[in-house]
Amino acid sequence: MKLMTTCLAAVTAALTFATAGQAETLRLGDFQSTSHIVSVEGTTKWMAAVEEATDGAITFQHFPSQQAAKSKAQLDAVNNGILDAALLGTPYHADVLPLNSVVALPGFYTTAEQGTKALQAMLKDGPLREEILAAGVTPIFGFVLPPYQVLAKARLGQPADWDAQDIRTSGSTQAMTARALGGVGISIPGPEVYTAVERGRLDAVLFPLASVPGYKLNEVVSHISTNGSFGGYSFVMVIRSDLFDGLPEGTQAELLRLGDESALHVAQAQDASVSELIEEWKAEGIDTYEFTDEELTAVKDALSAVSLDWVERIKSDNAQAVLDAYAAQTSQ
């Protein structure tokens, strides 16, 4: 009886996902390489799960490493019909998705899992979701990188240690973070950071630890913090809204369900990788250090104005509500 029930459920699912007897192939854009942890444990894992769960009714044509569109043009490519779906790096689309830059604020989440749960909740209902929908796409799932840490040639602890340091930052919000600590925020593309540190152009780098191996930054710094929270970076998987809305309800539900699972999985995988990396760097002789309670308090006080500046800079009636919701979701 149990076997018959299982078989009937499988048949029902196959009929639900079928769309006029034809498979739907989604062209999915991605600016990450297929070897990056975000792709291995997130994007490609989700695509495979969707294809299996829908029995091939939904398949994907994947364009990683900016093959279909540059990182800053992924959203435009979806809206213009070049792509059907994309993994957006929200900081690259801050002009269209300014409220989603709340994730870049310092002092909130401390692990990728914590930050991802907060983002997922805010993408299901509220201003972040509405902002993405207004851009012509539907959010399927979102996740964050582990919180940015500081990698430097000297140990940076109290705000006084940061004074006049040239610090590589990602985006305007993180530049505000560097300035609040007394440093100078400098925007340099990821591939150029290694050389900039090596040649003395940069004194420090704000970077998520899970991404350090891809740029080999551990080779040019001697001190890496492990318990700071200097902002974050969010990814959101989106599908063009008219296409998503035209899918059967069962298919929509399955895309979202598997998205929830994938978001949590890639977050946990990143957190686990960070723990392993820290042990490797210790063995290499790098000073992987935790800020003391006194240092954390001083840094937090110095960074308190960044969130207020963000609200003013966004110039949106929803900015304060988004900040309050984000603080509540991350239990700050």
Image: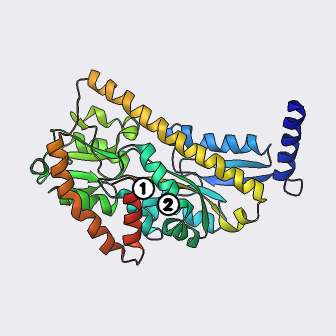
Left or right of 48 in this view: 288: left
Q: Which residue is mark 1?
A: 329
Contact check, label 2 and label 1, Cβ < 8 Å: yes
* Amino acid residing under circle 2: Met
Residue sitting at x 40%, y 78%? 317
Relative to 306, does residue 191 appear above or below in the rendering? above
Q: What quarter of the picture does the C terminus occupy?
A: bottom left
Residue sitting at x 49%, y 66%? 128
Distance from label 2 to label 1 (Cα)?
A: 8 Å
Residue 264 or 187: which is nearer the viewer? Answer: 264
Residue sitting at x 55%, y 37%? 40
Q: Residues within 10 Å of mark 2 (few under 14, many from 20)?
A: some
Left or right of 72 in this view: 134: right
* Amino acid residing under circle 1: Gln
First reached walking from the N terminus: tag 2 or tag 1: 2
Q: Which residue is mark 2?
A: 122
Q: Position of residue 130 (x, y in %)?
A: 54, 70
